[in-house]
Amino acid sequence: MSIIFAIIIFSLLILIHEFGHFLIAKKNGVCVTEFSLGMGPRILKKQVGETLYSWKLFPFGGSCMMLGEDEEGTEDDPRSFQSKSVWARIAVVAAGPVFNFLLAIVLSVVVIGCVGIDKPTVLSVTEGMPAYEAGLREGDVVTSYDGSGVSIGREIYLQEVVNPMSDETIIITYKRDGVKYTAEVTPELVQKYMLGMTYSTADDASVTVSEGGALEAAGLQDGDVITAINGTAIADGLAMSEYLAENPIGAETMSVTYLRDGEETTVEVTPVLTESYSIGWSYNLYREKVGPLATIGYSFLEFKYDVKSVFKSLGMLFTGKLTANDVSGPVGIVDMIGDTYEETKSDGWYYVLLTMANLTVLLSANLGVMNLLPIPALDGGRLVFLIIEAVVGKPVPRDKEAIVHMIGMILLLILMVLIMFNDIWKLFS
């Protein structure tokens, strides 16, 4: 089933992307010679007017081939791509990523309409800790954290991942009763016992296990669902958060029951004493439903968050905060879709479909951003040459542009092969 979901998601992303090129090309009078989904040999094909519609064997790709797109000497044909104005050509090339963005926004409306949004509300502040001393209180709504605007709770979490707390002061802006305040908070180095996990209060108590942590030492793995701690039943992530707030982790060994592949296991876990910086607060990651108009508005904020995540991830990659093992290609994405399906199938089809829709939002935003990067052979690389033409008033010689795109395509293919082998290596390591 996970393979079927992967094929559906990949096909939808590619179909929407290529349909963007197709629709705007047709609107500008460009002859589309072939519109295809997939790569490799054709399985089905049908000629309709001037366009050959085809479905190819391998689902990871697609194309919208236009008359004169990469050919010399077609400028005199009124139906060719090259005969159109530079702004029409910019619109055609940009349409693919733009349609991926539109897909992300539409699906965000569906997801938010069903499960709501995580408002960036302060849930608790520990008395005597830096956040409390700086003036933050329960119920405050965060609007900016560490120089990054905040509209949803996950944006705070994202910024904490990108810039982990240190002894440097953090600027937090927040609203209370409609009045805006600014707090300068200097994290404090604290010692505390940890289980070594992350989880969401919005879902079941499934955990991501930290490397070298207490849960990993006890045998837990990513995706395991905690169902009881010290004999107390844990219904979901929110219940686990409330339990741990009422029963702080200490040096004593804990009994943890978890669910994996339908089978419950109970293990003894010895918390690990760690040092970390903290400001002594917790903020909301739990989703709550909002009205129809707010749902539409928050769908754009959700899209903004996904785009921000892509750019911040690229920044972490270039600064060395992420490594090659953190990058995934089609094989790794298929594996991620499979893991997501396995983690949610026990909750029923409603939650499976919602989770897949939410994953599609992220992938569609990712595809749109990556295609707009100024990389030769991608839409962004083509847009660079078209923008140069719009500025200087004449096109870059086609042969020189073709060489740049060809080199870019070769390098991209080499990179994709390396990423694919890395994904396969991670699967079996």
Image (spheres, helix red, strand yellow):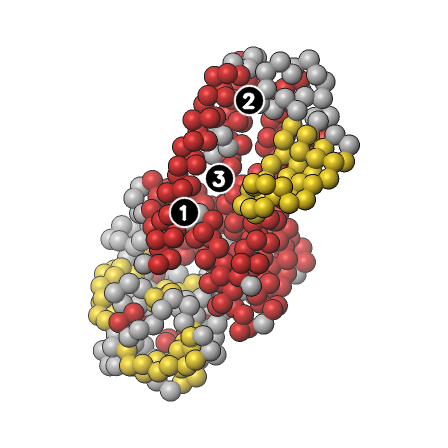
Residue underneath mark 1: 420
Q: Residue at x 60, y 26 (%)?
A: 90
Residue 27 is situated, as x and y percent measured from the top left of the image, at 73, 30
Is 267 on the left-hand or right-hand side of 375?
A: left
Q: Earlier in the sequence, mark 3 or mark 2?
A: 3
Q: Quadrant of residue 417?
A: top left
Which quadrant: the C terminus?
bottom left
Q: Secondary structure at mark 1?
A: helix
Question: Mark 1 or mark 2, which is nearer to you?
Answer: 1
| Nearer to the camera, 152 or 408 | 408
**Rounded to the nearest whole Å, what is the CA distance between mark 1 and mark 2?**
32 Å
As shown in the figure, which amino acid type bears the numbered disc 3? Met
Instruction: Identify the residue under disc 2.
Output: 386
Name the kind of residue labelled 2 in the image: Leu
User: Quick one: which residue is furthest to the bottom in this view?
Assistant: 231
Identify the residue at image location x=63%, y=41%: 42
